[in-house]
Image (cartoon, grey):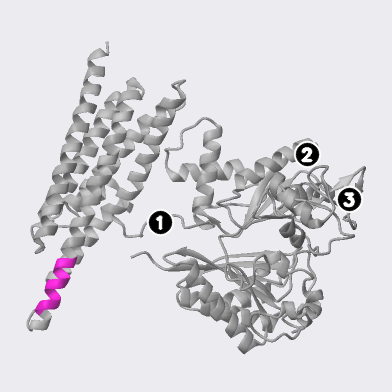
Amino acid sequence: MEEKLVECVPNFSEGRDNEVIRQITDTIKRVNGVTLLDVDPGCDMNRTVVTFIGSPERVKEAAFEVIKKASELIDMSRHHGSHPRMGATDVCPFVPVSGVTVEECIELAKELGKRVGDELGIPVYLYEYAAQKPERKNLAIIRQGEYEGLKDKLNDPEWKPDFGPAKFNPRSGATVIGVREFLIAYNINLNTRDVKIANDIAFTIREKGRSARRSGEILRYKESSYPCGSCDFEGKTIQQTGEHCQKEHEYDLRELLMLNEINPDAPEGSPVKIPGKFTHCKAIGWFVPKYDRDQISINLTNYKVTPMHDVIEEVRRLALERGIVVTGSEVVGMVPYPALLETGKYYLKRQGRPTGIPDKDILETAVQSLGLRDVGSFIIEERVIGLPKLAENALVSMKISDFVAEVSRETPAPGGGSVAALAGALGAGLVSMVSTLTAYKTGNAEIDDKLNTAAEQCQEVIQALVKTIDDDTVAFNAYREALRLPDKTEEQKKAKKTAVQNAITNAASIPMQTAELSLKALKASEIAAEYGNVNAISDVGTGAYTAYAGFMGGIYNVLINIKSIDDARYKTKMEQTCADLKRQAQSLLEQVESIVENELKAVK
């Protein structure tokens, strides 16, 4: 079963006092079942971003304890910093990582918000997916006026907190709690100290955009004159202009005005706004003395819609137009594994290189292409959340010589199932190698795409089968443990029989996965044999036969395991499946063998 994991990323309004930061983070460390992943203080912003992860209940407990500690240590009436803020714990989002739904995280946010409001007397607003009102979904809108305007906001019935008193807490301010997609705090570095340039680019890319100008003057809404910032259209009412913007430019003018703290029902006198290039993107420019250069500080609130590579490439283009260059970029805190992986693939494709290579190489391509080591270190293993990891005692962590020795010992595990998985992975590796050696060198886009797809499929097979090497041994050991259960009483006998049947069914399902995955490698070998570099045709043949060995090893282990299963219908179904898959595998192997041997005969 997938482990339930929730990430929490509270932002605290303290980035200069190391002792205060230490006490805050120590509070998290003291909560069992929670792992502190990252602490990122910013002196100029006077703000610290903390990242921790754990089971839902444990994370919720740690979040409460750390909000409580921050309320004791941070006095907002004395706080100054460049980043927008409204409370000691300014924002506290939950992010579903694995085995947890958004809906479950929303309940966590509500439970935490109620406890913070009731026990600490801090006004709490819910945002993003947890928002109880549409206008409170966007954090920027909730935080408008910041701490200095919070007292007046709390006096407005429209801004009654979701939890806690509608009363100004001068020491702690207010806290915003919610559920969101993974937010990537991402800074792009520029070789300039002119903050105007950095802000100019930030306003161009951010979702809330900038003010429209005509003849150098800021354009403003007037009664009966409501210009469109994106073209020359001018409506007689704001509703008319809003309809035009939606139809012609595909953006919601009302939402854009609210993002810019403009009353959409009475915008007269306010600047006309133009939306920025990217949605789910917040950005501002500032000078960072520590780095002696400007940065565009960016929050990407949905990297699946607006990824890092799209943003930095647009900034590179805009910077070049202004006579400056991007020197690199910086991730504050953690970055999701899928986000960095997609960025690596994006740059590999731009370089005309195959993407069916090990993930580690793809991630390194992303790090180098984004310039993530421009102003500091970036260690992939420490900064990427969700990075697939192997257990320290995993079989696949052994040296090859040690693994072979372990297999050869007078113990039943690791046995044929683990060896079959290894064989399938090695076969897929060889097919991937030939495919990537040839892809983007054929001069034929369709063939290149087939080879690259084959290589990508092989990499997926490799990752899955490497895990299966250990899974097979674990499943077999679980079966042996079930056999050792006591069976003296009728109740014990019944419990033991159920446990044994469940364990053997699971033990049969794992080699079936091995067979199915190895079959995918065999299918990819047919592509490599037909279109791959002929000088590597022997590697294709070796890969196909090795994958076939993995396939047959999987099939044999399924058949031996199901012999002990009582469910006759299940056994018949599995036997039929094995027979069908075997026919497919044999046909594929014969086709690959024919291609390989014909090519070998042609070699002079």
Say which label, 2 or 3, has the lower sequence index. 3
Query: Amino acid type of disc 1?
Result: Lys
Tell me which residue sits at (75%, 66%) in the image. 84
Q: Residue tagged by mark 1?
A: 389
Q: Nearer the viewer, residue 352 or 476?
A: 352
Q: Position of residue 131 (x, y in %)?
A: 61, 71
Q: Amino acid at mark 2?
A: Ile
Q: Quadrant of residue 561?
A: bottom left
Report the span colored magenta: 493-502
> Is disc 3 in contact with disc 1, using a CB cutoff of under 8 Å?
no
- In this rendering, does residue 484 appear at all? no
Say the numbered circle drawn on residue 324.
2
As measured in the structure, the alpha-carbon distance from the residue carrying label 2 to the one carrying label 3 is: 28 Å
Q: In the rendered image, which quarter contains the C terminus?
A: top left
**In this picture, is 409 found above or below 526?**
below
Question: Which secondary structure is most common in the magenta stretch?
Answer: helix
Q: SS at mark 3? A: loop
Which label was assigned to residue 219?
A: 3
Q: Is residue 85 above or below residue 381?
A: below
Numbered circle sitting on residue 515: none
Estimate the x, y position of residue 67 in percent, counting from the top left.
Answer: 62, 79
